[in-house]
Image (cartoon, rainbow, N blue to C red):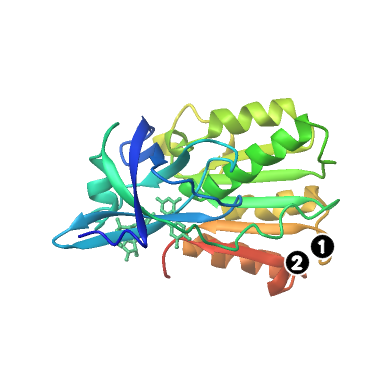
Amino acid sequence: MIDSEKYASATVTARRDFAPDLWVIRIKPEIELAFRPGQYVTIGLPRDGRIVERPYSICSAPTEPEIELFIERVPEGELSKPLFELGVGAEMVVRKRTKGLFLRDAPVEAQPHMFVATVTGIAPFVSLLRTLADRARAGEWSPAPVVALQGASRSEELGYADEMTQLDAEFPWFTYVPTVSRPWDDPGWTGELGRVEDVVRKYADELQMRTGYGGVFLCGHPGMIANARGIMKRRGFNDKEIREEQYWPD
Ligand SMILES: Cc1cc2nc3c(=O)[nH]c(=O)nc-3n(C[C@H](O)[C@H](O)[C@H](O)COP(=O)(O)OP(=O)(O)OC[C@H]3O[C@@H](n4cnc5c(N)ncnc54)[C@H](O)[C@@H]3O)c2cc1C
């Protein structure tokens, strides 16, 4: 029996697959779920008389009618494996409250931003960028430079690369930098090479970021977060100036 105080049901309305273990779904909860860019929704599936549930950062903007999620299937993952089996029309449960403080300080007015993501870690930034793009188009946001760095093993894993590239072309204040760490598996790749933390220093230099000037937001793989935090701290940033959303424990 599902606790209707805590959970609502949601239906998968669309699905887009990228690489073999990476896909985007849109879900329509039966209730309205309010959230800010950077927050996550907890979704679950009933298994053996209990709900198996995990948090997922929301990619959609708060103004969109559905919730969009970018998910990686983890080998033998208790939830991501059965989630991967769900097609359009399938049902799941969602916690009625969205949560998270990750991007509550963004955008930092009149300061440059560096968003750093590993693969699905781009999700909260997509939500914020869709929101900022709408505000910029309406003339409500005075742009400061925003650079989004996204790392992956191969370019096929760079979900949202097309959308990010289009925003980059539309807005002079936005730059999208994808990087690939296994170029030997990706012979056609001509962009940045290496893990995403390998290019953090270069773009922090370009943005002239220094303590007191610049917002640093890191999301995804715990190893990347530790490495990028170390790079920014050696640049003089303090812990409070580096915001993080770590997707699983070290
Ligand atoms: C705030 C927050 C937001 C998140 N947002 C997203 C998101 O947008 N998209 C997304 O795919 N995941 C996201 N996650 C991770 C997600 O909640 C699950 O942990 C993930 O889907 C694995 O769950 P599982 O039940 O399949 O695996 P489990 O059975 O719980 O875990 C198996 C093990 O796999 C490891 N693991 C977990 N995730 C990964 C991974 N991606 N790559 C490699 N190893 C991993 C962990 O060490 C874990 O012990 C987020 C996590 C947090 C805390």
What's the residue type where badge 1 is placed?
Arg
Q: Whole-percent x and y of residue 90? A: 26, 37
| Kind of element beneath mark 2 | loop
> Splitting the image into 4 quarters, where does residue 63 fall?
top right
Q: Confirm or deny contact between disc 1 and disc 2 (CB under 8 A).
A: yes
Q: Image point 70% across, 35% down: which residue?
A: 133
Q: Whole-percent x and y of residue 59? A: 52, 43
Does the image show residue 160? yes
Does the image show residue 194? no
* Quadrant in which ligand 1 is drawn: bottom left
Checking the image for residue 235, the label placed there is 2
Residue 69, relative to residue 139: is it above or below? below
Q: Whole-percent x and y of residue 121? A: 51, 51
Quadrant in which the C terminus is drawn: bottom left
Mark 2 near ligand 1 (CB under 8 Å)? no
Residue 217, relative to residue 129: is it above or below? below
Q: Image point 58% across, 30% down: which residue?
A: 163
What's the residue type where badge 2 is placed?
Arg
Gap in angstroms between the C-alphas marked 1 and 2: 7 Å
Mark 2 residue crowding within 10 angstroms, few (<14) / some (14–19) / many (20+): some
Q: Image point 70% across, 55% down: which residue?
A: 201
Q: Image point 25% across, 39% down: which residue?
A: 86
Q: Return the residue nearer the eye: 133 or 222.
A: 133
Quadrant in which the N terminus is drawn: bottom left
Q: Dot 1 corresponds to which residue?
A: 210
